[in-house]
Amino acid sequence: MTESVRLNLVMVDIHHHLLPGLDDGSTDLQTSVAMARMAAEDGITHIVATPHANGSYAYDPVGNQALLQTLRETLAAEGVSITLGLGCDFHLSYDNIQGARTDPRRYTINATDYLLIELPDFAIPPQMEESFYDLRLAGTHLILTHPERNPVLQKHPKRLAEWVQQGMLVQVTTSSVLGHMGPVAEKMAHKLLSDRSVHFLATDAHNTGRRPPKMRAACELVAKKYGTDYANLICRENPLAVFEGRSLPAQPQSEHVYEEPKRSFFQRLFGK
Ligand SMILES: [Fe+2]
């Protein structure tokens, strides 16, 4: 099978709260099986299970690996065909950063160099860039989860644009692309897509209801609006490279990364 044929057969979700009973994602094994089945029916072939690693949820990679194995066996018995991997939804707390500096593969996707990071919602301190620097020195490639849903970055997109210029990889949520996360997230998701500043689509699935494990509709919309090549890149090629721990292929040039959002007359008048 050629590489391009293989790529057309995969759809890879690198952000998914599939493991049961660990966080605000799947509540039990039955729900995890239902989520995996729904994902497989949607065409998803690979899922990285990414439980939260933050102050609210204890992070235990050894326990998570055992849980993943139980889920693999259950899915095989239930006839659900999907390839599972393991990572975490890494919150940028002091403890996590110190932990990742000494042992990054405790947190990365499939013990590769790729680390999924989530920003705080209501304040991004100026020293955040230092944390990125420290994590990069530890050898990780950072993938920022759903910036389009972050209220601070929605107001200050230039900050994200600078990070992208510095090599930050960006994951946008499928439901934002479809408008299910509100109009502000939808607009920012499409601005990032049209600027070619998105490297991955992923579901960030939490359940089979409001935050479902589906990628196909969003990938098809991206193909329609921004071209099949770009959709394939961010739904198949890039996430498969991450899953398998390979370098990403050449990426399109990001556009408008230094552009400030337009300010209203009153904002300009009062210097805001
Ligand atoms: Fe998440």
Image (tube, rainbow, N blue to C red):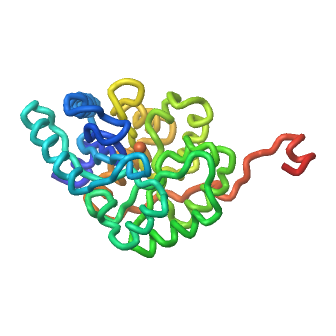
Residue drawn at the location 33% of the way across and 33% of the way down:
213
Position of residue 241 relative to residue 104, above or below, is above
Residue farthest bottom in this picture: 137
Q: Is residue 241 above or below residue 79?
A: below
Indicate which quadrant contains ligand 1: top left
Q: Eyeballing the image, is 89 above or below 19? A: below
Name of the residue lying farthest toward the right: 269
Question: In x, y percent, where is residue 61?
Answer: 26, 56
Which residue occupies the foreground of this view, 89 or 179? 89
Q: Between 53 and 174, which is closer to the camera in this rendering?
A: 53
Expressed as whole percent of the image width and height from the top left, the position of residue 113 reads 34, 66
Q: Is residue 160 above or below residue 9?
A: below
Foreground pick, 214 / 124: 124
Q: Residue at x 41, y 34 (%)?
A: 220
Q: Is residue 41 left or right of residue 148?
A: left
Q: Is residue 167 left or right of residue 29?
A: right
Of residues 205 and 120, which is closer to you in this image?
120
Residue sitting at 65 percent across and 54 percent down?
Answer: 256
The residue drawn where x is 23% and y is 41% is 45
Picture coordinates of residue 240, whole percent (x, y): 29, 53
Give the total of numbered labels: 0
Q: x%, y% of residue 95?
A: 44, 63
Residue furthest toward the left? Answer: 77
As drawn, the residue found furthest toward the top would be 209
